[in-house]
């Protein structure tokens, strides 16, 4: 999947209407005006993240991402959102959003349906840095607004989980109408399964008859977006939340037998343990940098049996202890 993310002129226009100095945002992100093109400008993931970080520094109000999501007009939606809005139900709308999102940018949406809750996660394929907080809030708000607009009801999530330090909690609680959990293992939007059955009232069969075949053809024309290694990494990130991760559980997530999973990983030049270590290291660094979780809590989330085991592993990865690594990054 190409590392291309569109920045629409409509978004810039809407930000200006919200009182944002977009020229200052672009300067802060290191995007020169000559890069801007009519309609939309294609950025790398790194540039797109820089734009959202700069927006967080410049925006006159902290609700700017929430308002972008909640106040978008139909003509301002991308093709994935438009296809979702014309679905027969909220559940089908989320499935369409997840299916067609990669036509818009290198982002993968996962819907994890469990007996008592539904968890939505969003993974940026080319990201090698933490997601900007405003971007995460905007993506979650757009998913909730889809349900509210399509059903005509005030869809309220079970909770919002954010893998960052506590900030703007009253604002987020008012917008989403639910508990907001900070210092989480990963960013998750958690929904009530009953909400997925909510019927949508905007379904237009003529629009779907024209739009969906074209989107499916575009998907078929794309090269394979992910490898098994990518899928294993993503599944491990979702599993690292205080559970003991095993190859059996991971294989079940991927609908493979443990033996087949291990064999195919060896064929790809890696192993389950190597990928587990890689994801644990990446997650440990992210949680130490972005949250106030202490090393013992991080060890639990990563599935280590005890703090000493985590400390030994971290020293092998970084050459220092978790606390010293955090202190060095804060200086």
Image: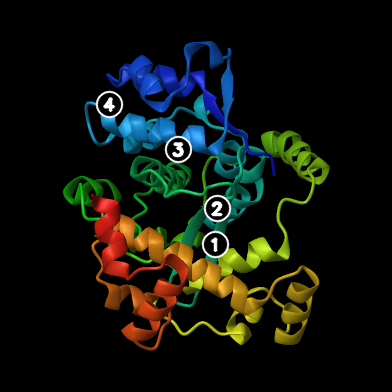
Left or right: 118 as drawn, with respect to 265: left
At mark 4, the secondary structure is: helix
Q: Is residue 80 above or below residue 15?
A: below
Q: Nearer the viewer, residue 299 or 259?
A: 299
Q: Residue at x 40, y 36 (%)?
A: 69
Identify residue for label 3: 49
Q: Percent position (x, y) of residue 146?
A: 46, 44
The numbered mark, 2 or 3, whose residue comes first in the sequence reads: 3
Left or right: 209 as drawn, with respect to 328: right
Dot 3: few (<14), some (14–19), or many (≥20) neighbours within 10 Å? many
Q: Nearer the viewer, mark 1 or mark 3?
A: 3
Left or right: 42 as drawn, with respect to 261: left
- Residue 58, which numbered label? 4
Can I make out residue 164 in this image?
A: no
Q: Nearer the viewer, mark 4 or mark 1?
A: 4
The numbered mark, 2 or 1, whose residue comes first in the sequence reads: 2
Q: Nearer the viewer, residue 289 or 66?
A: 289
The numbered mark, 1 or 3, whose residue comes first in the sequence reads: 3
- Mark 2–mark 1 Cα distance, whole angstroms, equals 8 Å
The numbered mark, 4 or 1, whose residue comes first in the sequence reads: 4
- Residue 223, which numbered label? none
- Residue 94, which numbered label? 2
Can I make out residue 149 in this image?
A: yes
Q: Percent position (x, y) of residue 122?
A: 51, 53
Marks 4 and 1: CB-CB under 8 Å?
A: no
Q: Residue at x 21, y 55 (%)?
A: 166
- Mark 2–mark 3 Cα distance, whole angstroms, equals 24 Å
Q: Nearer the viewer, mark 2 or mark 3?
A: 3
- Mark 1–mark 3 Cα distance, whole angstroms, equals 23 Å
């Amino acid at each position: 999947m190409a590392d291309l993310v569109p920045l629409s002129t409509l978004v810039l226009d809407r930000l200006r209407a919200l009182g944002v100095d977009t020229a200052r945002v672009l300067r802060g992100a290191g995007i020169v005006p000559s890069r801007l093109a009519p309609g939309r400008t294609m950025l790398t993931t790194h540039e797109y993240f820089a734009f959202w970080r700069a927006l967080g520094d410049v925006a006159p109000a902290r609700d700017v991402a929430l308002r972008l999501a909640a106040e978008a007009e139909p003509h301002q939606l991308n093709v994935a959102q438009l296809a979702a809005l014309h679905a027969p139900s909220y559940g089908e709308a989320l499935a369409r959003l997840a299916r067609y999102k990669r036509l818009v940018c290198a982002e993968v949406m996962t819907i994890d349906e469990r007996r008592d809750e539904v968890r939505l996660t969003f993974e940026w394929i080319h990201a090698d840095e933490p997601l900007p907080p405003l971007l995460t809030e905007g993506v979650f708000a757009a998913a909730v607004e889809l349900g509210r607009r399509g059903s005509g009801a005030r869809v309220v999530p079970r909770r919002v989980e954010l893998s960052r330090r506590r900030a703007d909690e009253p604002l987020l609680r008012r917008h989403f109408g639910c508990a907001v959990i900070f210092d989480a293992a990963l960013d998750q939007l958690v929904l009530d399964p009953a909400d997925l059955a909510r019927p949508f009232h905007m379904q237009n069969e003529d629009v779907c008859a024209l739009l969906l075949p074209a989107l499916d053809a575009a998907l078929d024309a794309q090269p394979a977006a992910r490898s098994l290694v990518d899928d294993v990494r993503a599944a491990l990130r979702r599993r690292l939340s205080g559970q003991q991760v095993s190859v059996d559980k991971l294989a079940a997530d991927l609908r493979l037998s443990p033996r087949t999973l291990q064999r195919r990983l060896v064929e790809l030049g890696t192993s389950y343990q190597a990928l587990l270590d890689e994801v644990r290291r990446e997650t440990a660094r992210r949680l130490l940098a972005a949250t106030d979780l202490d090393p013992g809590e991080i060890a639990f989330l990563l599935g280590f049996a005890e703090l000493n085991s985590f400390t030994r592993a971290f020293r092998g990865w970084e050459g220092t202890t978790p606390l010293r690594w955090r202190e060095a990054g804060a200086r």
